Amino acid sequence: MASTLRSSFSDCAGTVKRVIARNDATGWAVIELETDGGSVTLIGGLAFIDEGLRVQAEGEWICHPTFGDQFKVSSARMFAPVGSAAIERFLKSGAVRGIGPVFAKKIVERFGDKTLEIIEREQWRLRYLKGVGPKRIDAVAAGMTEYRGRMEVMSFLHGQLGPLRAQRVYDKYGNDARDKIAANPYRLIDEMDGIGFTLADRVARDVGIGLEDPARLQAGVVAVLKDAAAQGHTCAPWSKVRARLETLLGSETLADRALAQTERAREWHSLEHEGETYLELHRYRASDERVATLMVQLADCATTLPEFDAAKALEWAANQIHIQFEEGQGAAIRGALEEKVCIITGGPGVGKTTILRGLLTILEAKRLRVALAAPTGRAASRMSESTGRQAETIHRLLEYNPKAGGFQRKADSPIDADVIVVDEASMMDLALAKALLEATPLPARLILVGDADQLPSVGPGNVLEDVIESGLVPVCKLTTPYRQAANSPIIANAHLINHGIVPDLGQNTTEFEFIPTEDKQQTAETLIETACRHLPDEGVDPFADLMCLVPVNKGVAGVEQLNNVMQQRLNPHAAAQLERGGRRYRVGDKVIQTKNNRDLGVFNGEVGLIRRIDTTEKIVTVMFDHREVRYSFGDLSSLSLAYCLTVHRAQGSEYPCVVVAVDVSSSILLTRKLLYTAVTRAKQRVILIGQKKAIHIAVSEARAYRRHTLLKSRLQSQRQQARPTPSE
């Protein structure tokens, strides 16, 4: 009878008597609430609620087969405790930093119902308590201010964002969170990982922003364009934007009204390209135009460097490094010596390293200053190993310093080099290419080296391919693997894949192996056993020498689930751990930065190891390529486990051993370029796990995942402007 009566209720209010169970990793909690009608059990996202607080919750009554009536919470607001007993219970819970059970009892005995008011407004009266000095008073006051701000923010955001996201928002903005979000809830889309337009829009409803509000309509368009940028596009067709807007905003009318604001929009514009209308954020047009201008200027500017007799230089370099250059290699070196800007592209084993060694030998003999760089730390390390010279990340070459405002090398303080060589250039997104070109002195030579057949950059843009297709600069494309490389099963099979030919999957070797599975569940289980048991038993270090790659983030064979299982298998007994935002971090974990954090100086795609977790200072220390980065808890949302990565995120990296899941459940994402990129991440051994059908799908699927970019046309337009036709 009680359950039938209670099922009609949708709210519940009272004082928290005790927290029965709590899981900070998921935000789930079970609490006992004292109400006017007696004790009630609340369940749901309540992990931030402490004993003694008053709670007003909305939800529904359910009847648990074992525990009886429970109130399942959908949203909750909390308020300060009232009365001496509730205040003492609250302070004893340890919720307020600086106050423990003994001190809580002492304060409440002295000040009673006015205890919280005294702590917040008349702290000086605490000095009358025995043993309490100025430092203790300041600590208690600061702890109460922090808690009050957190409580207000969590109550404000809980209903729309849930406890975990609300906690992350508080970590980010602190006590100013409510004011900042009330002024512009759509800022959450830009500034918080995992919060898109839909969630921000819910918060907007709470602060009174209507469905037809211009701010909401503009935020919708910007959100669609930023979602496109997250997939690598720098612009998007009008038709696709409109279709997505209709879903986001809720009607065709609102979608059309949002797009009608284009002419007066602050963040985007429209333009015609090849007979179709595109929408583009202003920032990408500015970057595109800057890259195009600088590239043309660099290519056209006369050099102050000495001229080379390429034939003699090649013969001399061959004798110096004891190598006979093949015809394609010689042509590439001649192009690099003679052209202001050139591109050398080709797959594994085609001689790019040999070309660089010969080229660098010649340039150094002329006493030219040469800078070697790559987009990521791992790619830079590989470049150093293969050339025998010091290479660094592009960010380090440009002297990135977050405290000084970003890149220190720019037009007025260019890179101190005569020749700049960038490896893994396909990984350069638009923003990084712009920064590099701005810091490249006009008399210098720029040589871009990469594999145009790999997946494009993680960030927006398709710079290398756009520059190649523009015809602006000479391109040397190497296609034939040379003698020793051609004998490597990894390289041989990578070239087969790239040419649309399925490797012989029945011919397993110690370097290239295929393990068949029936379905995605077996694929995931086999990958885990291979990475966590079989390969370590063979002496493979899963932290330094191994990477598992999959096409997708979600699902049983996706990055998220695989990482959680592999963490438990490979790093179960860490010295310290932390649960934050639904993720568990442990000392010793392999992690990856998933978003540029210019304040910390760590960038998308960097892989490191957690060295320390300090829960007192709320700092997690990660080692990236011999440098430590200290993350506040609020910055952890962009730090993920990296025992397993998507193929896209692994670009530019090489590992001795790579395990790749190729399953038909991911067929929509399986392409030739993706499989080719995955296989070429391995230096010594590749293990493919999945179905032959999935590999056939990938190899036969030659559809080019074409990014929507406008750099190619802008480069061509800039070239025409720089060199008018005779009729002009």
Image: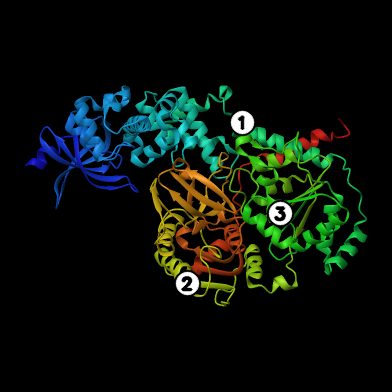
Where residue 660 appears, as percent x and y from the top left, is 52, 64
Please tell me which residue is depicted at 61% across the width and 31% down the height of the picture: 282
* Other residues around mark 2 within 10 Å, as few (<14) / some (14–19) / many (≥20): some
Q: Quadrant of the C terminus?
A: top right
Q: Amino acid at mark 2?
A: Pro
Check residue 516 in the rendering and tell me which mark sits there, or answer none: 2
Q: Amino acid at mark 3?
A: Ala
Please tell me which residue is depicted at 24% across the width and 27% down the height of the picture: 115
> How far apart are the alpha carbons under marks 3 and 1?
34 Å
- Give left or right: position of 264 versus 1: right
Residue contact at pointers 1 and 2, CB within 8 angstroms:
no
Q: How many marks?
A: 3
- Give left or right: position of 163 versus 84: right
* Other residues around mark 1 within 10 Å, as few (<14) / some (14–19) / many (≥20): some
First reached walking from the N terminus: tag 3 or tag 2: 3
Where residue 77 appears, as percent x and y from the top left, is 27, 32
Question: What kind of colouring is applied to the model shown?
Answer: rainbow
**Can the viewer see residue 72?**
yes
Disc 3, SS: loop
